[in-house]
Structure formats: C-alpha cells, structure tokens
Image: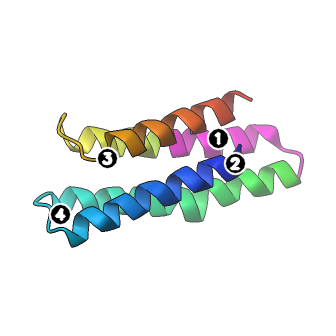
Amino acid sequence: MVKVMKAKANDGLNKIHQLQKSGNGARKVLNSCGDKYRAILVADIPQAIEALEKGDPKFAEDGANDAANEATYCENEFNGKSPLTKQNNAMHDVSAVTAAM
C-alpha cells in the first residue's frame, strides 16, 4: 500500500506541475500544494517504509496519516475550487486505508 501511496503522490505532483506550466492563476496555492506533495514523497513515505522494515507499525501509521493530512490541507487551500480534487482525494483515501491497516 505504501507503493500505491507513492504512485498517488507522484500523480498529484505531476498534476501540480502541469497546472503551473499552464499559467493557472493559483500559483501561490499550487506552490504550497507542491511543497505538501514533496513532503509526502521525501518524509512521510520513507518514514512509513523504514518503520515497516523495522517492525514498527505505529510509526508507519503516523507517516500514512501525515500523508492523508497533507492532501486534505492542499484541497482546503483552494476554498472549494480545487483543480486537484481528484488527486487530493485519491492521496487522502489510499493513505487513510494504509494507516488503518
């Protein structure tokens, strides 16, 4: 499931890059969301992987929950007009399921 999280995070980051290149007016929010997705990729996912390898499922759960929260924060920054709803929902959902396992 952590591999699925990574795939979803990469998908979200790719969508952000596409929107930034298209000159979308929400540049500040897109930059913030990009930071959140990069945090998922460089902190939350590696944390979950390392925790699972060391047999510490609680620490892995924390990493997955953090990833779900980052996606939610990104979505909320758009105040209901997010071009990333599909990616944010997918990231949140796969992370929440991973944490629950």
- In the drawing, what numbered circle is on residue 2? 2
Q: Position of residue 15 (x, y in %)?
A: 36, 59
Nearer mark to the viewer, of 4 and 3: 3
Task: Looking at the image, tell me whether mark 4 or mark 1 is earlier in sequence order.
Answer: 4
Task: Looking at the image, tell me whether mark 1 or mark 2 is earlier in sequence order.
Answer: 2
Q: Where is residue 77 in the image (x, y as percent from the top left)?
A: 24, 44
Task: Looking at the image, tell me whether mark 3 or mark 1 is earlier in sequence order.
Answer: 1
Q: Which residue is under mark 1?
A: 62
Give whichever of 28, 19 is nearer the camera. Answer: 19
As measured in the structure, the alpha-carbon distance from the residue carrying label 4 to the one carrying label 2 is 29 Å
- In the drawing, what numbered circle is on residue 30? none
Q: What residue type is disc 4 on? A: Arg
As measured in the structure, the alpha-carbon distance from the residue carrying label 1 to the one carrying label 2 is 12 Å
Nearer mark to the viewer, of 1 and 2: 2
Residue 81: quarter of image: top left
Residue 21: quarter of image: bottom left
- 44 to 1, vertically: above or below: below
Q: Give the range drawn in magenta.
A: 54-68
Q: Is residue 4 left or right of residue 34?
A: right
At x 33%, y 61%, the residue is: 16
Mark 2 secondary-structure assignment: helix
Q: What residue type is disc 3 on? A: Leu
- In the drawing, what numbered circle is on residue 84? 3
At x 79%, y 51%, the residue is: 51
Q: Which residue is under mark 4?
A: 27
- 35 to 82, vertically: above or below: below
Q: Where is residue 66 in the image (x, y as percent from the top left)?
A: 54, 44
Q: What residue type is disc 2 on? A: Val
Label 2: few (<14), some (14–19) or many (≥20) C-alpha neighbours in 10 Å: many
As measured in the structure, the alpha-carbon distance from the residue carrying label 3 to the one carrying label 2 is 21 Å
